Amino acid sequence: MREMPWRGAGVAIPMFSVRSEADLGVGEFLDLKLLVDWAVESGFHLVQLLPINDTSVNCMWWDSYPYSSLSVFALHPLYLRVEAISENIQEDIKQEIREARVQLDKKDVDYEAAMATKLSIAKKIFACEKESILNSKSFLEFFSENQEWLKPYAAFCFLRDFFETSDSSQWGRFSEFSKEKLEKLISKESLHYEVVSFRYYIQFHLHLQLSEAAEYARKKGVVLKGDLPIGVDRNSVDTWVYPNLFRMNTSTGAPPDYFDKNGQNWGFPTYNWEEMSKDNYGWWRARLTQMGKYFTAYRIDHILGFFRIWELPDYAVTGLCGKFRPSIPISQEELESEGLWDFNRLTQPYIGQELLQEKFGASWTVIASTFLNEYQKGFYEFKEECNTEKKIASVLKSFLETSMLVESEEKLRRKLFDLLQNVALIKDPEDLRKFYPRFNIEDTTSFKDLDQHSQNVLKRLYYDYYFQRQEGLWRQNALKTLPVLLNSSNMLACGEDLGLIPSCVHPVMQELGLVGLRIQRMPSEPGLEFGIPSQYSYMTVCAPSCHDCSTLRAWWEEDEERRHHFFQAVVGSDELPPDQCTPEIVHFVLRQHVEAPSMWSIFPLQDLLALKEDYTTRPAVEETINDPTNPKHYWRYRVHVTMESLLDDKDLMKKIKDLVRGSGRCYPQKDLESGQANGGGSAKLPLGSELPSLAQTNGIPNREAVALV
């Protein structure tokens, strides 16, 4: 590192959240040019997005979830600007676009209406110019370069629509993918070739529009930062074409954490890393190569998944009763040597009459007769037809249709899940002589009702499993996979390392030159309630909030206790904090972050808008992008002001620019002769597609490259 390392600032906003005067109800790739202009004028060198891949699995608003990819290569049709597809759009279609622009200009994204409108209009334009476009030199070059993923993607979309499901097991002879079947399906002689080629056409124009925006950003000296999701939808092109790369009877998630005491279940199948290694992780390398066409940096979603993943059975609904893969389990011999032998008692739900009465009150007998069998006096087990979380959810729904119980379905489901999760150990379904301690084992009555010796043994084994025995294995696993990603492109890699962090993670990230993430209210340092930005290391991205938590303003209003703690410990005031997050408080927090030693300070656009009272009239809770506790959250937040209006707001841009300039961070400086932005401040570095980038050999950063950054 040189004496004064380069430090930059950026803005983060999902593509769908951007609003412009030209869009059709949702942010579009060409809107990035406006966002880049605003970033430069505000003193930023970076624009960060959420994933932009096609997620059209269910063909409804559930698909608004950007981390559940239908294809890890295809771009999302949602972000297409239909008006820019052709220079020869008929007047009646232009009128339709103008009318749609008015109809779709809503407070939030109407995912289904925006998708339906764009595809409908695009089909009309396609019908007029398909021959000329599909035979053009530029399209043929695009097709040749991308056909490996483009052909199966187009075929999948056709089959999904034809069979009205993305579940390929319902597709008859097409359930199992083969190249021979694929070639017949997409043949130019087939009756449905026009339907298939329409998908080529859409992807071609998405590529052109995103490439135009990416090139514009490079010329302006702005880094476009993408997002690499950890999973793919279990009903996706990738699981159809490469089923051997996935463990389809499992589901990924996260153990209980800041976001949810019951853990998270994302529903993606886990990866078969052993199979992936056979071609040196070719699928991953192809993903990164594709991303590198558009982005200069990327965020590795849940980088912990490359060390180990929280794996759940596919019949789980919550994320609580899982285990890490890979991990070294507790063997039956190990337990027996410690004097534990009653494995049924430890692994089966421990349900006594007293617990039932405590949870369900006078209704306990109705619940017991519907869901449970009494296997011995006062003790119960779940019936076969409701002995998993998914079965319980299904049976409960039917039960409530005829039941007189007044308690809500959600509360009853939660209580029944609590009964099912009341175990001390989880048996490995692949090897019944191996066991895993249930997360937060000491919270269960199954544990509390054991004798002291058994409790002591299980506490020791619990701590060993989660915090000691796996470290070497997880380090080894990450050093096999992560260098392959890093060497697949010249993009700067940043890892989202939030959650339960094994001690091996940060040393490995440091060894590989990976930039970590620091969110002030979710500190990675033990014993701290709030992170201290001035103490962050250089190889980090720091931010006051992110898409997975409430904005700075919303958090301030919803969490009174922590607001008081923050005002006292961080602001340094013994006075009562104001109920609202005033622009002065926002400025204080942003200044802390922009002055941090971190390589990047990246701010959600909502937090930047809160610097000005004019933009705080909307209820703060409406600015939250995601609710991690809700697996069916509707991702639809739209900025309530257009990018054109923000570009006209010189006052806000000055507030932000003054923050950046006063922090010692580099800021874009317009060259009077070329009109292009260059690195300002102390560094004076030209910011093209090369900056910042880590040249690497076998995953280890080259010293000269790190010095350049």
Image (spheres, rainbow, N blue to C red):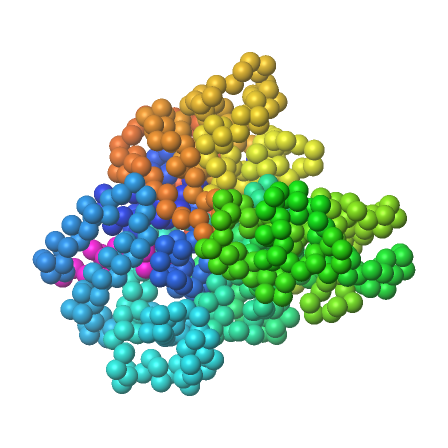
| Left or right position of 615 against 375 | left
Vertical arrangement, residue 678 with respect to residue 210, above or below: above
Pick the quarter of the image with the C terminus.
top right
Please give the name of the residue rendered at 39% of the width and 53% of the height, measured from the top-left corner. 64
Pick the quarter of the image with the N terminus.
top right
| Left or right position of 565 against 581 | right
Horizontal and vertical percent position of residue 255: 63, 50
| 564 drawn magenta | no
Q: How many marks?
A: 0
Please give the name of the residue rendered at 69% of the width and 62% of the height, measured from the top-left corner. 326
Vertical arrangement, residue 589 with respect to residue 294, above or below: above
Please give the name of the residue rendered at 66% of the width and 32% of the height, measured from the top-left corner. 528
| 87 drawn magenta | yes
Residue found at the very far top of the displayed protein: 575
The span picked out in magenta is 75-88
Residue situated in front as seen by the camera: 348 or 683? 348
